[in-house]
Amino acid sequence: MPPFIENPNPRIAIVGSGAVGCYYGGRLAQHGNDVHFLMRSDYEQVKEHGLKISSPLGDFTLPQVHCHRSTAEIGECDLVIIAMKATANEALLSLLPPLLHKKSMILTLQNGLGSDDFLARHFGSAHVLGGLCFVCINRMAPGVIHHIAQGQIALGEHSGAAQVRTEALAVEFRRCEIECKVEPSLISARWKKLVWNIPFNGLSIAASGKDTAAILADPVLEQRVRDLMREIIETAGRMGHAIPLSLIDDMIERTRNMSAYKPSSLIDFLADSEVELEAIWGEPVRRAKAAGIAMPQVERLYEELKERIAAR
């Protein structure tokens, strides 16, 4: 196995063992990596029966999984992958220290804006990487994950340009059947992902529970998707993050060709769980406003979501 960091047998922790954490952690474990999952509600089921993952790339089962109830039980790791919701970031202040040594990498796969900065403030920018997951995936039951489509991770460094470790980590992900590319600018990549996340995650809730297919089947909602995407791209450009307008048609056609998909924010909303309201909608609006840029379309959706969530 080619080492992707100095340790030839790196120890990996997954913090946030829902659909995303179990899928990517499962892929890494499937291909021989030493992966340890922090689990709460699924602990007993996974401890006894392992992880089952169905995927268009091929189904697989991990009968023996290193799952733990606490990060202290896991101990120091070379790579810590964070896949929990950004709404729970304060918990990382106590969860992460037992996992870290002087050269540990912290890779956050969280949505929206702000998580990388939060981690950098508390644990040092040099430790922090960000990964943007372009994936359709659901947790069907404890220890049962359904990978529907896509799966690419776009990887970047919080501190700036890609490093040797960034490229090496991407190579290891690809070896483990995880499509991965390295981004020259993590913050630019995050704005690019918002072009999909803001309209589809938001309208799925604002339009009373519509999946992606239902949104695009409604001409009014499709036009609203396009208007939101254009505003995000134009705002990103004014803030120094160039994104081509051609991405609008590309993202819409890719989404149209997927099976009907319930975005993760809709699943959270329907389950009465916390929605990543601030990371995905609030923070972009605030950052734009601080730069003197108005985002009326996104702000309108942000206000609608606040009302929907408050009315649950």
Image: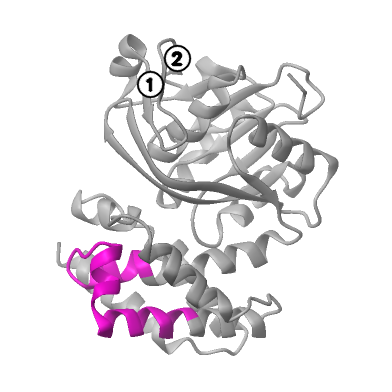
Q: Are marks 1 and 2 in contact (CB under 8 Å)?
A: yes
Residue in the picture at 47% in, 24% down: 37
Rendering quarter of residue 213 = bottom left
Q: Earlier in the sequence, mark 1 or mark 2?
A: 1
Q: Quadrant of the C terminus?
A: bottom left
Circle 2: residue type: Val
Determine whether 227 is above or below 82 in the image: below
Residue in the picture at 56% in, 60% down: 114
Q: In the image, residue 100 lies at what x, y percent?
A: 66, 28
Badge 2: residue crowd in 10 Å (few <14, some 14–19, many ≥20): some
Q: In the image, residue 242 lies at what x, y percent?
A: 68, 77
Circle 1: residue type: Leu
| Residue to which mark 1 is pinned | 51
Residue 6, visible in the rendered structure: yes
Q: In the image, residue 166 lies at what x, y percent?
A: 76, 43
Q: Bounds of the magenta span?
A: 200-229
Q: Classify residue 14 as left or right of residue 258.
A: right
Q: Considering depth in this image, is 143 or 181 the residue closer to the camera?
A: 181
| Residue to which mark 2 is pinned | 65
Residue 306, visible in the rendered structure: no
User: For the stretch drawn in magenta, what is the main secondary structure?
Assistant: helix
Q: Classify residue 271 as left or right of residue 259.
A: left
Is 216 contained in the magenta span? Answer: yes
Q: Considering depth in this image, is 276 or 89 the residue closer to the camera?
A: 276
Residue in the picture at 39% in, 82% down: 299
Q: Quadrant of the N terminus?
A: top right
Residue in the picture at 38% in, 61% down: 257
Query: What SS does tag 1 mark?
Result: strand
Determine whether 248 is above or below 119 in the image: below
Determine whether 175 is above or below 128 in the image: above
